[in-house]
Amino acid sequence: MIKTYFYSSELIVFCNQIISGVEYCHKNMVAHRDLKCENIILDSKFNIKIGDFGLSNTMQYEQLLKTRCGSTIYAAPEVISGKLYDGSKVDIWSCGVILYALLCGSLPFDDENIPKLYKNIKGGIYIIPSYLSDGASDLISRLLEVDPMKRISIHEIHQHHWFKISLPHSLEVSPTDTV
């Protein structure tokens, strides 16, 4: 069975703006560490702004972070496990939770039973609704990859086929922009 679902161009633009904003932070060696829907702001011209940098931290090349922070339901497995982590990789995980919320209208990890919530996050246990296209499902699964070393990079997100659906030419990333 072939899934042929179309997503509004606005949603693709919003996702692209979120990823581009996170990419800008990372290029400036800043890990947000508290990306969540509540910190994504839409201005009067329908442009995305990332807010609340209260838990952000500067990153050093190849230096890992250790502080457990951020909202649990958006936190990457390595953060809730208390392991050292790459700030950019945990931000990408949080982008996966945000994308899931935008596409599905709910969070992938949400349980009042905290031990069960932690188990689901650490195991990457969530349900991808059948109405999502194969491309959207693939991107979400690559963003919510439990192993941070296998998790998709910002560059790979920009190249993902779902991410390019209906994307206005003004937002397409040129090869010189990724250098």
Image (tube, rainbow, N blue to C red):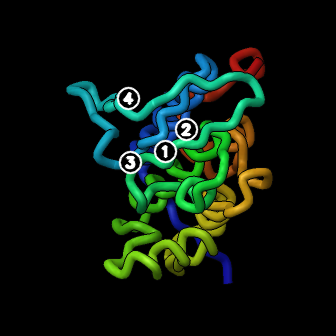
Q: Quadrant of residue 54?
A: top left
Q: Give the image location of residue 172, x and y in percent.
A: 62, 29
Looking at the image, tell me whether mark 1 or mark 4 is earlier in sequence order: 1
* SS assignment at label 3: loop
Q: Which residue is mark 2?
A: 167
Q: Give the image location of residue 66, x and y in percent.
A: 59, 42
Q: Which residue is mark 1?
A: 12
Q: Which residue is mark 4?
A: 53
Q: Quadrant of residue 76?
A: bottom right
Q: Is residue 21 placed above or below 123 in the rendered structure?
A: above
- Label 2 and label 4: CA atoms lie apart by 28 Å
- Label 2 and label 1: CA atoms lie apart by 6 Å
* SS assignment at label 4: loop
Q: Give the image location of residue 65, x and y in percent.
A: 62, 38
- Label 1 and label 4: CA atoms lie apart by 24 Å
Q: Nearer the viewer's eye, disc 2 or disc 1?
A: 1
Q: Nearer the viewer's eye, disc 1 or disc 3?
A: 3
Q: Nearer the viewer's eye, disc 1 or disc 4?
A: 4
Q: Which mark is residue 36?
A: 3
